[in-house]
Image (cartoon, rainbow, N blue to C red):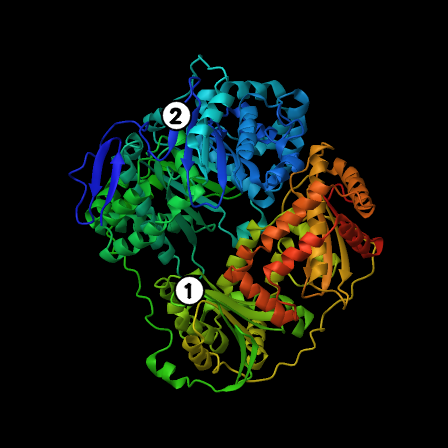
Amino acid sequence: MKNICFIFGVLVTLLSEVGYSQYDLDSTTKTKEIDTSILHGVLDNGLTYYIKPLNNVSGEVKMNFIVKTGSFKEKPHQNNFAHHIEHLAFRETTNFPEGLKSNERLLLSLGMNARNVSGKTGGKATVYDFEIPQSSTRSILVGLKWFRDIATELNLSKNNINRERGVLLQEYLAMSASREELATEEILNGKLFPCMHKDNQNFIVHNKTFPYKDLQKFHRKWYRPDLMAISIVGNIENPKELESLIKKNFSAIQRRTKVLKEENCTELYFNSDHKFSIVKREVNSIKKSFGKPINLNLYFRDQTTLKKRNSLSGYKSLLEAHFITKILNTRFREEAKVYNHNARRFSIHTMETKTSNSGKPESALKVIIRTRMHEEVAALEKTISIIQQLKEYGISKRELEKTRKQFLKDFSLTQTSNTDYWLAEIKKHFVYHDILPKNKNACTRDIIANFSKEEINNSVQRLFSNEPEDIGIILPSDYSSLLENEKKVRSIIREVFKSPVNQFKIPRAPTKLLNEKEVQALEPRKIASTFEKSSNIKEYVLENGLKIVLNPLKGNSSSGKISLHAFTPFGAACFPKNDYFSAIYAPSIIKNTGIGQFSKFDLERYFQKFNSIQTGIYPYISFKEAGIKGKVTKEEFEDFLQIIFLYFSQPQINELAFKDWKHQSLSNSYNSLNPVNDLIDAINTLTKDSTQPPYSSDRIKGIKKVNLNRAFEIYRALFNSAENFTFIVTGHFDKKDILPLLQKYLGNLPNHKKLECSNQRHSETLTQGPVFKKGNISDLYTNINSYFGLEFVKPRAKKDTWKEEVKVKVLGMILNDLLFKFRSDEGLSLYHYGAGGNYNRPLGRYEIMFRFNCVPEELPKIRNLTKELISNIKLGKIDQNIFSNAINKLLAQYSRINQEKLSNKLDNLYKHYRYGERINGSKDWEEYLNSLKREDITNTAIKYLKEDHSYELILHPEELAE
C-alpha cells in the first residue's frame, strides 16, 4: 500500500521499497500551500485563520487564538510581560465586563465551565484556548468575541495591571524548590544565546515595581493582526459560514503599516562566536548530598535543518535528528543501568516544540548532563565517549528497527481524528512556518518507515561533525570545579573524541522470567468454592484461601485489555508506628531491587518487548491495605501473572540497591519540596490522617527512617499471606481462557503464616474541633508567602449510603467555584487555591477542605471571607447556575461512557469488595443527581460545616510566625 503526499504542489509518492533520492526534497517553496482539508486564509489586515472540520469528534470544537509573541520577545525590563497580558485576558474585557472565565452563567448555558477557557505563554507565542464540548453557532460566536477582545479590547488600565501583580507573584512563588533552578537556567540561556533576556532572580522586585506604561507599550507593539491567527477544529458543519463570522468580527481591526524592527536572533546566533558560560547558584543541603546539582549543557549547532525547515527536506532532516536523540537517549539510559550511577543524561533537538528547551537556541542538538559533585569530569568524559561510539560505529540494525517502532507510535494512524493534533500542527505552521501538506501524518510515517542505517548514520556525522560549539555549566555557589576553565573543558572533549572506543552493545534481555521446568512445577490448584454474584461476576476461592473475582465484559474477547487489582485489608497499620515508613516504602524498594533471579535492570530490558506490561505493574502498601495493580493485553496476561507470582514469592533484598533507592528517593523528594505540599502534610498531621505518605519536607524525614530489613520483613509478611488477598480481574476475556492461568500462578502464591492484625496499632483518635494551629514554613527553601488550610472532618454514620458522598462532592464543587469570586470580585492576589469534598474510605470519614497560598497581609481577609462564604452556604445562598454546574460536572463523571471505562469498572468492583459498597449503574447516579435540590446541599453544609468539625492551620515564613 502506498501513501500519497502533496508537498508544495509537487506530487510525492512514497513507496515502502524506495528511498528519497528521486524526489525534490530541497524545494524552497514556502508554506502557504497547506492541506486542502483546512479552510485557510489571511484577512486584509494580516490576521490568519484556519478552519479544520472533523466529523468524528462527538460535537466537540476547539478554538485557539495565537499571538506570535512570548518571553523571547521581552527585553530585560519587560520580564514576564507576555504572561502578564495573557492573565489580563481573563479579567474584564469589552464584551465580557466581568471576565469570561468568571461568567459561570454564560459558560453553563454553552455547556462549558471555567476549565474550558485557558491560556498559555511560551517563548514564541501566546495561545488562548476556548474548548466547546458540544458545538453551536452561539458558542463559537462567544469564542470569537473573546478572541476579538484579546486582540484589541483588553483592559490595560493602571488599576487592572497592578491588580494582577499579586496573582503573578503567587504563581511564581508556588514553584518553590524548583524556582531557583529555573531562574539559573534562564540566566545561563541569556549568557549563551541572543534574545534570551529573562532574569527571574529579580522577579519579585521587578514584578512589584515595573512601570505599568511599559506593559502597555509591549502590548501595543506585539498585539497586532499580522501576528495573530485563529484556528478552529472539530465538528464544523459549515466552514464557509464560520469563515464569514471570522471576517465579520475581525476585518475591522486596523492594519498596522509600521514594519516591526526585530533583532534577527537566528542570524545573530549562528554568526556568533562559540560560547562558554558558567553560572553559580545556591543549593540546599538535600540537593548537595543526594541530588545532582551540577548541570552541563552541550549544544551542537544545526543550521542546516533550520535553513530548510519549510521544505520536505528540512522536515525529513528534523525527523532524523529526533530519531538520533531517541537512539542516544536509549544509550544514555542503558549506561545508567547500574546502582548509584553518577549522572543522568538526556538529548533533545531544540526545534522540538513540545518541551521547555524549545527555541533555546533556535536549532541545536542539546545534550544535558546532571551529575553529582566531584564527579562532573567523569560524567562529561563518559557522555562524550557515548557520542563518539555513535559517530565511530553508527547505529545497529537492531537499534534502527527498535527505534523506528517506538518513533512510529508518536505518529499513530488514529491521531488525525484528534482535535489536539490539528491544533498543534496549525500552531507549528503559523508560528514556526513548519510544513502542513495533505496527508502529513501518513507522509511522516512513510519517511520514518523508510529510514535506512546509512541515512541515520550520515545525519549522526553531520550533527556531531564538530565538538559542541556552545557549553553552559551550572555549579553550586560554594563549589570549585576543573570545568570552570573553558580550555580544560574543550580539551577533555577533544581528547575523548580522539580516543578509541568500543562498539556500543545493549545487553540482551532475559527471554523468560520462569524457565520451562519452573512453569511445569506450578500445578494448577483446585477451586475450593465458587459463588455466582451476578450473571457476569463470579467468585472463586482457591485451595490456598485466595479469592478471585472475574468480571468478563461483553464484546470481542480477542482484543482489548485486562485489568487486575489485588488487595489485602492489612497494611502499615499492622506494624509498630516506628515502622510506618519502612512499610509504605517497601514496595518501591523491591521494585528498585528486583524479583526472582533478575535485577530491576534485567526487568526493564525484559519489559521492553511487551506493549502493555512495560506501562507498569504496581505493588503498594498503604496505611490499611496492601496490593498490586496492572493492566495488560490478553496476549501478555500469562507473562503478567508470572511477574505477579515473583513479586509475591521471590522479592529480592540487596543493600546496594537499597542505598540507590534511598539516594534517588531523597533526590526526587527535593523536586517535590513545596510549601503547598507542606500545608497538605501539616493538615494531614493535624487531622490524624496517615492514609497518605507525606509529600514534602516530612517525606525527606520519613525516607531517612526506613530500615531495609524491616521493610523486607513487612513486605514478606503482607505478601506471603495469600488467603488474605482478593484478586479482581475485569476486561475483555473468556473465563475459560484465564481461569486455568489464575489457578496455576495465583494458586501457588505463598501462604506461609497467617497475618494477625488489629489494624489499630497506631491509629490516633481525632481531637474534637474546633482546632487551630500555627506553624512555620520549612527552612529548606525561602518563602515570603503564608499558607492557610481549613478542613471539616466528620465520621461516616452507619446509615449513610453512597448518596451521602455525592452530596459532599457537590458541596465541595460549589465551594470551589465560589472561591473564584475571592480573586475576581474581591481583588485578592490568589493563584493556587481551592476547595473540595470527598469521602476518606480508609478512615471512614467525610472531609471538606479549603487551601490557600497568599501574601501574609491578605490572610485575615481570606479567613473572614471563607467564614462568610460558609455562613452564606448554610443560609441557603447557593446560586442556581453554580449549583447546576456542579451537578453537570458529576453527571459527566458518572455518565455511561465514563462508567464503561475499564478503569472505572475495576474501581467500582474494588470499592464493593473492599468496602462493601453498592455497584451502581450510570442510571442510578443520573437519577439521584437530577433529583438533588439546592436545599439538599444547604442541609449538607449545615451538617458538616460545623465548628466542632473544623481544623484550621496557618503556615507562615519563620519571621512572621508568632
39 horizontally vs 122: left or right: left
Pick whichever, 398 or 287, lies toward us.
Answer: 398
Q: Residues within 10 Å of mark 2 (few under 14, many from 20)?
A: some
Callout 2 amino acid: Gly
Location of residue 336 by image quarter: bottom left
Pick whichever, 587 or 703, lies toward us.
Answer: 587
Is residue 219 visible in the rendered image? The answer is yes
SS label for mark 1: helix
Residue 435 position within the rendered picture, expressed as x and y whole percent measured from the top left: 32, 34
SS label for mark 2: strand
Where is 498 relative to 727, above or below? above
Residue holding disc 2:
41
Residue at 34% across / 78% down in the picture? 515
Residue at 45% across / 31% down in the picture? 191
Callout 1 amino acid: Ile
| Cα separation between marks 1 and 2 | 47 Å
Residue 791 position within the rendered picture, expressed as x and y whole percent measured from the top left: 75, 53
Mark before the other along the chain sequence, 1 or 2: 2
239 horizontally vs 400: left or right: right
Location of residue 84 by image quarter: top right
Residue 918 position within the rendered picture, expressed as x and y whole percent measured from the top left: 65, 68
Residue holding disc 1:
613
Quarter of the picture holding the C terminus: top right
Location of residue 478 by image quarter: top right
Residue at 75% across / 59% down in the picture? 687
206 horizontally vs 401: left or right: right
Is residue 657 visible in the rendered image? The answer is no
